[in-house]
Amino acid sequence: MKQMLFTQRSLNGANGLTFHKMLGTGGGAGYSSKPDFGTYALLTVWDEAEMAHRFEPDSAPMRNFSMHAKEVYSIFLSPISSRGLWSGRQPFVFSEPDPENPLITVLTRATLKARYYIPFWNRVGGVSRSHENARGLIFSKGVGERPWIMQATFTIWKSVKDMEAFAHDRGGRHYEAIAKTRRLKGFKEELYARFQPFDSRGTWKGEDPLGEQLASLKGR
């Protein structure tokens, strides 16, 4: 937690870095009211992909993370669409999708209004369970700037078809939770963004969840 504070300060003004957030995570797959005090995330947005690749192994913040962590896992993403705002701004510059890359990453984040904390979190358990058996889901973790208030979900899917089948299932817990929160105007701010993952480094629980898929894309 000390690193979260000082890393945020050290990134301010970094060359080519246009947006960044230090994020905590939730327990289990991340969709839990109980924080995961052993896992943290750093979101960075760069002018160029090369800058992101140089930062990942060589920067002081990343070296510091590695010294204090059992594992560090990094995913490199190309933004392809986004709507909404994060801290009052749209942080991503979009690229044309690679038609030969079927993988899709989704980041959804929101700031909850105080009156909707309890109703929202009462639905989270059901949403978490629905993720467990979702077809085509490669990776899933809940993240956030502030526990219970500023929340985000980060998921990676084998295809847009798999992702949309889950997200748009009108009988599903995920669709129901989001739709009801919007209907009751429970969000102060929200953002929904899609990316294509194109590279990864390190491990998550001893393996690279994207390793096989990305290797096949690079070998095409």
Image (cartoon, rainbow, N blue to C red):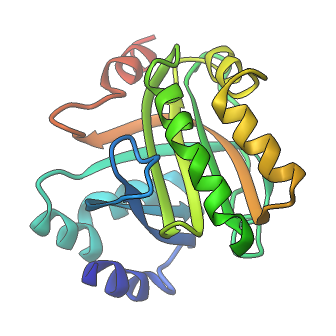
- For residue 96, say whether it is visible: no
Q: Is 13 situated above or below 64?
A: below
Q: Which residue is drawn at 69% across and 74% down?
A: 114
Q: Is 80 situated above or below 101?
A: below
Relative placement, left or right, of 123 versus 37 is right
Residue 170: image location, x then y, percent: 78, 23
Q: In the figure, residue 116 lies in which quadrant?
A: bottom right
Q: As rendered, which of 44 and 155 lies closer to the eye?
A: 155
Q: Residue at x 41, y 44 (%)?
A: 75
Q: Is 177 situated above or below 12?
A: above
Q: As rendered, which of 172 and 88 lies closer to the eye?
A: 172
Q: Residue at x 43, y 25 (%)?
A: 132
Residue 124: image location, x then y, percent: 55, 45
Q: As rendered, which of 54 and 137 lies closer to the eye?
A: 137
Q: Is 101 situated above or below 199?
A: above
Residue 80: image location, x then y, percent: 71, 40
